[in-house]
């Protein structure tokens, strides 16, 4: 078994990451690739919780801007995260790993209710816990849900896997001269207004002293290397 710097982690995946090169939905090759990366880390001894966004299916905030009731839109977005969580559970189980989807809203015929003590027990038993439906409340993003669940399960590290290899001082897709940070404090992120997670998520991590690392999910082997202690992406600490 490999020596890991971090044993219990919370991994946040964006829903858009599951689309691959498509405009909508879930690319089976992408989700199975992600599942294999997660399993390598789990077999090395990591206890892994997952939060997956729903932006590949539905964005409540976007439709609210177009006139839909925000609470209704956010509830629809929560259901989109459940769809993605079930897809990830299926991908993991097809590769021989036990996974449990736990929802912040009651959908008992499809998945378990989120109960903190049960979630921790799943992790202790070597199951991958997939936390769906955000926080169960409108007006909170899945970033906030990831920070909340990381706090509740006493995660040693919150990882956000994105399409960019860390935090930059400007959008690297628009500005080729953008500079990537290796390390920041939460206060620096908030002061600079770096739009990589919402303010509530950053504040929750800061107040509970949970380190956050952002990295490119397309970088092969990055998850395992981070757990071993390699300096990949951008680390944010208190």
Image (cartoon, rainbow, N blue to C red):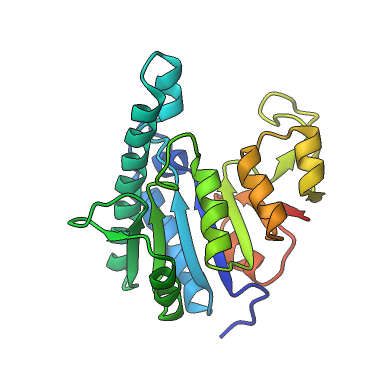
Q: Relative to the observer, which residue lies in front, 166 or 126? A: 126
Q: Position of residue 23 (x, y in %)?
A: 38, 29
Figure check: 228 above or below 132: below
Q: Position of residue 95 (x, y in %)?
A: 32, 68
- In the image, what residue occupies the spot 34% across and 72% down? 97
Q: Residue furthest bottom?
A: 1
Q: Relative to the observer, which residue lies in front, 203 or 165? A: 203
Q: Can see residue 225? A: yes
- In the image, what residue occupies the spot 27% across and 52% down? 106
Query: Which quadrant, please, contains the N terminus?
Result: bottom right
Q: Position of residue 37 (x, y in %)?
A: 48, 63
Q: Can see residue 57? A: no
- The quarter holding residue 127 reads bottom left
Q: How many marks?
A: 0
Give the side of residue 81 with respect to residue 182, left or right.
left
Give the side of residue 218 with respect to residue 97, left or right.
right
Q: Position of residue 231 (x, y in %)?
A: 75, 61
- In the image, what residue occupies the spot 76% across and 48% down? 186
Q: Residue furthest left?
A: 109
Q: Residue furthest top?
A: 67
Q: Relative to the observer, which residue lies in front, 170 or 186? A: 186
- In the image, what residue occupies the spot 40% across and 81% down? 125
Query: Which quadrant, please, contains the C terminus?
Result: bottom right
Give the side of residue 8 with respect to residue 136, left or right.
right
Give the side of residue 190 with respect to residue 97, left or right.
right
Figure check: 60 above or below 19: above
């Amino acid at each position: 078994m490999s020596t890991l710097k971090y044993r219990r982690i919370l991994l946040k995946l964006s829903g858009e990451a599951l689309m691959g090169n498509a405009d909508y939905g879930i690319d089976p090759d992408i989700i199975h690739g992600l599942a294999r990366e997660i399993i390598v880390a789990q077999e090395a001894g990591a206890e892994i919780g997952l939060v997956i966004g729903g932006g590949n299916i539905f964005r409540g905030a976007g439709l609210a801007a177009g006139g839909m009731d925000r609470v209704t839109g956010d509830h629809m977005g929560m259901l989109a995260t459940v769809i993605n969580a079930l897809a990830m559970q299926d991908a993991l189980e097809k590769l021989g790993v036990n996974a449990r989807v736990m929802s912040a809203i009651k959908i008992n015929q499809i998945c378990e209710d989120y109960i903190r003590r049960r979630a921790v027990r799943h992790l202790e038993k070597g199951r991958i816990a997939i936390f769906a439906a955000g926080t169960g409340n409108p007006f909170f993003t899945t970033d906030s849900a990831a920070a909340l669940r990381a706090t509740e399960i006493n995660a040693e590290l919150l990882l956000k896997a994105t399409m960019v290899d860390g935090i930059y001082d400007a959008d690297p897709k628009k500005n080729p001269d953008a500079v990537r940070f290796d390390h920041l404090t939460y206060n620096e992120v908030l002061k600079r207004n770096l739009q990589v997670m919402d303010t509530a998520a950053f504040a929750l991590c800061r107040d509970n002293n949970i380190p956050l690392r952002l990295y490119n999910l397309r970088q092969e082997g990055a998850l395992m290397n981070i757990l071993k202690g390699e300096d990949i992406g951008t680390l944010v600490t208190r």
